[in-house]
Image: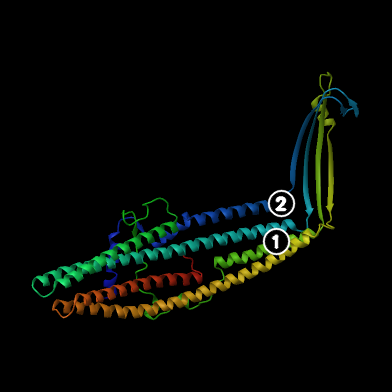
């Protein structure tokens, strides 16, 4: 049986979907990166990092504050006009406005700003990496759905063949060419095929459920082939084989070096920058700090139940005062707190570097493993294609021999089972090859989704 006949039922399913709501793999991946919960969490984390950067920018601006106080005094108190004790009830209020600006803090604000900016860049890389991870996972889940659907279709065809063989065997029994035992054997095989078809259908439903979860779809029945609300389009996966099978190595394999701009590597590199800026900010704790400030304040005082008090506006102007100040803080001994913090920040830098090298080594290993698996899939495809052709021919010969009484039903069912296994293996190999090629292109810098 040729490859064209092998995948004809699947392509017919895709053709029947014309004019309906078709979910291509690109559409599934795009939906996933927009609705997956982990992507949403990462987007919110990135927004927090943007807020931290905004706060780091605000640290360079002067701070201003206003104050307002009021109090009633009953009994013995100090008269603010005469500065003597009095026993009458009084009302006192104060008003102030002040501003301060740190002039030098050991460059802590500068390093805090650079840390916040590096955190934001790291968050962006993590968001892109999460989107790519979800897209690749949906890509694999999509391939699993195609495989399970193909397995269901193949099993349905085998069950139809068993029914046809059963009818043929019953006719041959009536004319005396077959015994009742042959009919019972074929009937038992038909029951086994129908049971296997039910099991394959359950696996298809589970694959659809995993795909729906990866995409972030909510609610029951929104993403199921049973109710006709989903049509999977498999043309991309079941297209012609890659250029490597036709003797031409793909362009993304000509330069097999790992792309240094992968979002996972970029996030690890930004983590090193964050650790370095935190270390430099910790060193600023060993330096003196200088700040300047200025302010204005005034008061209002009134003796209760006493006429002739100075008006509020006049007191507000007369009692007003201005001040400026400069503050210099020199760290002398803080019980080794700065030294301990500095040591931890230095270790954080070394840890971040090791994690970057570890991530780089991990991605290179995954790239090499993917390439080995891709080559294994190519070899398996070639071998399975030859076996598929031989199993198809063997089944045809067994059926002809069975018609003339030269073979038993067991021989026909054995050949049919071998053909089904070869077809399933061919489908799995082709889908796996698509996944590995997608991963290799990703490692070379091609994003799985725009």
- Image coords of residue 178 (percent x, y): 13, 74
> Left or right of 314: which side holds 131?
left
Mark 2 packing: few (<14 Cα in 10 Å), some, or many (20+)?
some
Residue 449 shows in the view: no
Kindly identify the residue that appears in the image at 37 percent across and 55 percent down.
Answer: 223
- Image coords of residue 36 (percent x, y): 47, 56
The vertical placement of 155 against 334, above or below, is below
> How far apart are the two marked residues, 1 and 2, measured between alpha carbons?
16 Å
Pick the front one: 128 or 204 = 204
The picture quadrant where one finds residue 153 is bottom left
Kindly identify the residue that appears in the image at 62 percent across and 51 percent down.
Answer: 51
Pick the front one: 110 or 149 = 149
Kindly identify the residue that appears in the image at 84 percent across and 41 percent down.
Answer: 323
Residue extending farthest to the left is: 175
> Left or right of 410: which side holds 217?
right
Residue that carries the numbered disc 1 in the rendered image: 278
Using the image, tell me which numbered label, if any, was put on residue 59: 2
> Left or right of 78: which side holds 174?
left
The vertical placement of 230 against 430, above or below, is above
Using the image, tell me which numbered label, if any, was put on residue 236: none
The vertical placement of 15 against 421, above or below, is above
Tell me if label 1 and label 2 are in contact, CB under 8 Å: no
Kindly identify the residue that appears in the image at 54 percent across and 74 percent down.
Answer: 364
Instruction: Tell me the quarter of the image containing the N terminus.
Output: bottom left
- Image coords of residue 229 (percent x, y): 33, 54
């Amino acid at each position: 049986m040729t490859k064209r006949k092998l995948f004809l039922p699947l392509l017919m399913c895709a053709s029947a979907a014309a004019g309906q709501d078709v979910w291509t793999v690109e559409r599934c991946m795009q939906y996933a990166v927009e609705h997956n919960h982990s992507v949403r969490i990462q987007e919110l984390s990135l927004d927090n990092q943007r807020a931290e950067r905004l706060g780091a920018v605000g640290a360079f601006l002067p701070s201003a504050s206003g104050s307002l106080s009021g109090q009633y005094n009953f009994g013995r108190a100090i008269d603010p006009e005469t500065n003597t004790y009095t026993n009458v009830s009084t009302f006192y209020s104060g008003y102030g406005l002040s501003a301060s600006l740190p002039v030098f803090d050991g460059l802590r604000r500068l390093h805090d700003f650079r840390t916040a900016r590096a955190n934001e860049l790291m968050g962006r890389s993590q968001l892109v990496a999460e989107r790519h991870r979800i897209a690749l996972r949906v890509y694999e889940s999509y391939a699993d759905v195609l495989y399970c659907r193909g397995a269901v279709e193949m099993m349905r065809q085998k069950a139809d063949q068993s029914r046809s063989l059963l009818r043929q065997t019953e006719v041959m029994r009536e004319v005396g060419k077959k015994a009742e035992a042959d009919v019972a054997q074929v009937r038992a095989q038909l029951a086994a095929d129908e049971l296997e078809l039910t099991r394959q259908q359950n696996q298809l439903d589970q694959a659809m459920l995993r795909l729906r979860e990866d995409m972030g779809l909510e609610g029951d029945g929104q993403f199921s082939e049973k109710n006709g609300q989903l049509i999977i389009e498999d043309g991309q996966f079941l297209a012609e084989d890659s250029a490597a099978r036709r003797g031409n190595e793909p362009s993304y394999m000509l330069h097999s070096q790992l792309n240094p701009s992968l979002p996972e590597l970029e996030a690890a590199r930004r983590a090193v920058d964050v650790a370095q800026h935190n270390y430099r900010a910790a060193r600023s704790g060993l330096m003196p700090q200088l700040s300047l400030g200025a302010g204005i304040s005034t008061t209002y005082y009134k003796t209760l139940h006493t006429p002739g008090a100075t008006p509020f506006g006049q007191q507000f102007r007369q009692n007003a005062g201005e001040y400026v100040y400069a503050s210099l803080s020199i760290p002398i001994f803080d019980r080794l707190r700065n030294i301990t913090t500095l040591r931890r920040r230095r270790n954080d830098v070394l840890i971040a570097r090791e994690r970057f090298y570890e991530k780089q080594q991990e991605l290179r290993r995954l790239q090499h493993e993917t390439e080995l698996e891709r080559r294994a899939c190519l070899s398996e495809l070639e071998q399975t294609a030859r076996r598929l052709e031989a199993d198809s021919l063997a089944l045809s010969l067994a059926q002809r021999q069975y018609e003339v009484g030269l073979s038993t039903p067991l021989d026909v069912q054995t050949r049919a089972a071998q053909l089904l296994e070869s077809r399933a293996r061919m489908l799995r190999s082709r889908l796996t090859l698509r996944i590995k090629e997608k991963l290799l292109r990703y490692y070379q810098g091609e994003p799985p989704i725009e």
